[in-house]
Image (tube, rainbow, N blue to C red):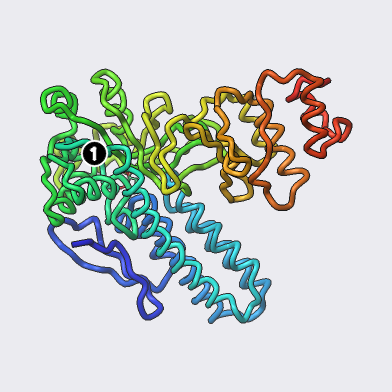
Amino acid sequence: MIIHSLEWKDNKLYLLDQTRLPGTYVYLEYSDYLKVADAIKNLVVRGAPAIGIAAAYGMLLAYQNLSRDCQDIATIEKRFLYAADTMKMARPTAVNLFWAVDEMIKVFKNTKLENIYGALLRKANEIERQDKEICSRIADQGADIFKGKKHLKILTHCNAGALATAGIGTALGVITRLHQHGQLSCVYVDETRPLLQGARLTAAELVSSQIPVRLISDSMAADVMKRKKIDAVIVGADRIAGNGDTANKIGTYGIAVLCKYHQIPFYVAAPFSTFDFSISSGKDIPIEERNPDEVRMVQGIYIAPKNIPVYNPSFDITPNELITGIITEKGALKDLERISDSHYEARKNIEAYILLNGNTIYLMAEGRLVNLAAGDGHPVEIMDLSFAMQALAVSYLCEHEKELRPQLYLLPRELDEKVAEIKLKSMGYEIDTLSDKQKEYLGLD
Ligand code: MRU
């Protein structure tokens, strides 16, 4: 049985109160966006994709209320944007929150006043529906990695399941698919202190789906990896930086380190919208620090001195070099390019990004993902491409093309200046039209 974390019905949002699971199963009703922001803050709804969907409906409620109270578009816009800022302040780490609110702002700004409500409703519905589909595709992509393998023992952390999404989950979606394919022997679930999302939520989801599960305390992970011969770890993500560094529930980093020692593949499963291409590395991901009582207490009972000073970061960063692959709905990214900060700075200026997935090259620009290698029919060996060439390609796309050109020709690294010039000309570009920055990338100055 799939548990639904949220539902939009009769112009109201209903959230399953996850703070009371697994004991009590109750939906709370919301018609005020401020209460939705509080629900996100207090983990009534949690998990990156579910937070994003709840925030989108929260923005719909904001519009519903403020369009009732005021008529002129300038005031409505001011208040809508204020509501958006408030919503974004609910939690700092999961990028899906910011992404979803920005999607709603875009719709608001691009729609005539009389159509705004309908357009916002359609957008929130679409974000929810797409998340469902994305989960399913992530599950398929993830299952592909384990093709032909049997009796798998997988370890997971926190909750990246149905409760954290609108569908079957991300990490837990892959695990569910493996179970459906008869490839799973057992899932080991870390309880995930301090708030026990593993014990309260993931364990409950797995039991309800009749998937074989063993609950372990966080401190048992190393021993379980060694003695139970874990085949892979799969976790979710709250934000993935441009270089692949990943923020997820506190404890994830430790597990990735353990995987390295035990030579166990460590996978992150997440929708593409979890990538934050505006930041270069994990060090720029804001990490939420939560109430010290979450550490001092378990389920409302003090297990430590009441005033003991506490450090309570809710997330940690797993560096890209510890991640075997990032499973997205578009494929598993196994060779995320390791880029230095200075290279990244150059790319940031051109507001685009190239993702490398095996032999396939994707260009991420203007919110679209394009497979660059597909067009000319010759998959390009990633190692043959220098950063300079990629940057040139991207900068051309951004500066000269309104429509992205999937068939863009990519130049091999060994090109000298002359050949580069000829190639560029054959592509219809003149060297003297290059900006100084582009020439610098190419070493042409
Ligand atoms: O604090 P939470 O419960 O919101 O943290 C959730 C996680 O860390 C999940 O692993 C992550 O959001 C991915 S959910 C598909």
| Drawn side of residue 114 relative to residue 203, left or right | right
The kind of residue on which mark 1 rests is Thr
Q: Total label count? A: 1
Vertical placement of residue 336 versus 14, above or below: above
Which element carries disc 1, helix, strand or loop? strand
Looking at the rendering, in which quadrant would you find the N terminus? bottom left
Q: Residue at x 16, y 50 (%)?
A: 206
Measuring from the top left, give residue 14's x and y in whole percent.
32, 70
Foreground residue among 263 and 297? 263
* Mark 1 crowd level (few <14, some 14–19, many ≥20, 10 Å Cα): many
The outermost residue toward the front is 377
Q: Is residue 315 above or below residue 389?
A: below
For the point 29% across and 47% down, the residue is 160
Residue 30: give x, y in percent of width and height.
36, 71
Out of 76 and 51, give the one closest to the viewer.
Answer: 51
For the point 43% across and 60% down, which residue is it? 130
Q: Residue furthest right?
A: 432
Q: Residue 232: horizontal and vertical position, in percent?
A: 25, 32
Which of 62 and 421 lies nearest the eye of the viewer?
Answer: 421
Which quarter of the figure has residue 379?
A: top right
- Left or right, residue 35 beside residue 400: left
| Location of mark 1 (residue) | 156
Task: Give the residue drawn at x 35%, y 38%.
Answer: 268
Query: In the image, is residue 350 above or below residue 69?
Result: above
Image quadrant occupied by the C terminus:
top right
